[in-house]
Image: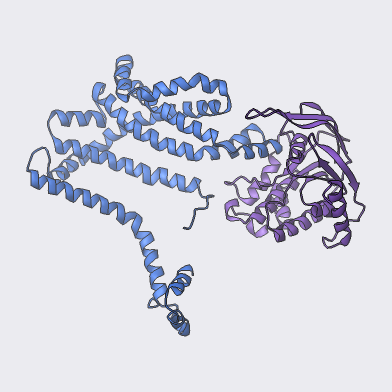
Amino acid sequence: MSMEVSSGGLAPPGAAEAPRAVPSRAGTLSHPANWRRAASHVASVVAPVALPLLLLGLVASAWEAMAVALHSPLVPHLPEIGKELARIFRGGHFFGEMAVTLLRVGAGFTIAFAVAVAAGIAMGRQKTVAHFLEPAIIVGLTVPGLVWALLCVIWFGIGLTGAAVAVALSIAPALLLNILQGVRAVDAELLEVAAMLRLPLRKRLACLWLPSLMPALLGGARLGLSLAWKVVVLVELFGLSSGIGYQLNSEFGAQNVAGVIAWTLGFAAVMGVLEYGVLAQLEHHLMRWRRTAQV
Amino acid sequence: MSSDIVIEGLGKAYAPRGGRRPAVIFDGLDMRVEAGQLVALVGPSGCGKSTLLNLIAGLDAPDAGAIRFDGRARDSRLAMVFQQPRLVDWLTAEENIALAFEREGSRPRGDAREMVRALLRKVGLVDHAGAYPQFLSGGQRQRVAIARAFAVDPDILLLDEPFSALDELTARRLRLLLQSLWGEADGPRPTGVLVTHNMLEAALLADRIFVLNGHPGRFAAVMDIDLPHPRDPEDPALFAIHRQVLHALGEA
């Protein structure tokens, strides 16, 4: 309806009356307002898929143009990369390595997330805890992931523990900072309502704290996952004989640029599925109570 | 079962901020509200009306004196309606009201779902049971907040300028809704304290009006309103009370 009203408002006087004079045509596609509405409907369905694909297509074309222009083994042609992709996906090779890496990321992420939620709520509620832990966050944020990767390989040797601890140590400070800000943003007025209703702790956590923290938790999860991937690859590269990082390193050793790119692309695709398929859907579902602005 | 509210020798001051002297809000205030009465606290803004209500609600602690609920039974159930609806945004209207049944140590009083439905019917929102607060109008949200307060089945009901953020027409409807909910309460009526700066609202709803004024706050006048309930907002007698309150505040 709003489309019709606004188009009537912009059109010269008289033009707006014309469609109204022929009501039988109002339901057909030939009606300009309906046509525009249908077009905008199609656009709203197609755009979320088409636009990211357009970007990918543009980047791929630019890459191919560069490969043709430079004519160098350092910039492989798209078909070569495609061949490498086919090779690593054959026989489930890629998914086996990906599963190993995801397990390491998942273990580290789970530890960091649990610690960050507990510490974040404690810091947000108690000033003394905040003063006590603040230096740890600041130091933690400044230590490069590379250092944690090296130290954990030395301390824990090769295995799941080292990788998980390195990932946890690298992402916990950023996660904690995010969650702490979320805790401080929890509506004091709602906490008063909870006190007025004498809600038990369990209910207060489930109905007030967790949903209030949800944006911070989701934002933290995104940030944490992106940091975790950067660290786990380093651990795998230094001390492990499996996983995406190890495979990247062995392709690098074989001076196979197309191989490095293929592994990276495969990994990025999995991350994309995680982001769009899992996190975005989860966020959409959890945030359904939120009214979005129509302007 | 409703409770008397007894306030004796109440003292409250706020620590100075930005180099000012500490603000003394109350110094030895006494007040008594009879069980089942609805009293109104009126006065100019900044005189401590809302502070007094927060002290009664236990959301703030007094520096001196005592606030007691001399109920004839068990510890008092307390509900509050705030100026803003203060609904939980991620729960539907229905779930917001049902939250009142989750009170610590309370036993379920019959079918919670049916009770929520009955309350929604009373506040005229039965069609919006599943709506999230951000999709409701300001008046509808405040209706949900009122229903939540009554869902507590309160002994004491505190109302902190509940209609002042609404447009006049909506506020008028909600005042009448509150009046009818108060009248229809099954069992004994709750003891109510209504903070308002609208003297006509006080005259319409209250059995007694406490006029608060000055620093530290003192009662400039206490008036009993003997008109029978329910009252008509156009009753000329209310305007006469309005003038009396203004007079007590030294404004007329």
Does the rendering let one see residue B61?
no
Q: Is A287 located above or below residue A120 in the figure?
A: below
Which color was chain A given? blue
- Horizontal side of A48 relative to A5 (left or right) equals left
What residue appears at the point 27 percent right and 26 percent down from the top-left corner? A234
Give the quarter of the image for residue A71: top left
- Horizontal side of A49 relative to A287 (left or right) equals left
Does the rendering let one see residue B235?
yes
Q: How is the image coloured?
A: by chain
Q: Is B238 located above or below residue B221 in the figure?
A: below
- Horizontal side of B221 relative to B82 (left or right) equals right
Q: Residue furthest top?
A: A155
From the viewer's side, name the closer residue of B1 and B202: B202
Give the image location of residue A294, x and y in percent: 48, 58
Give the image location of residue A101, x and y in percent: 31, 31
Q: Is A95 located above or below residue A69 in the figure?
A: above
Give the quarter of the image for residue A152: top left
- Horizontal side of A278 relative to B148 (left or right) equals left
From the viewer's side, name the closer residue of B197 and B44: B44
Give the image location of residue B54, x and y in percent: 74, 37
Chain given the colour purple: B
What residue appears at the point 67 percent right and 46 percent down from the top-left corner? B98
Give the quarter of the image for residue A73: top left
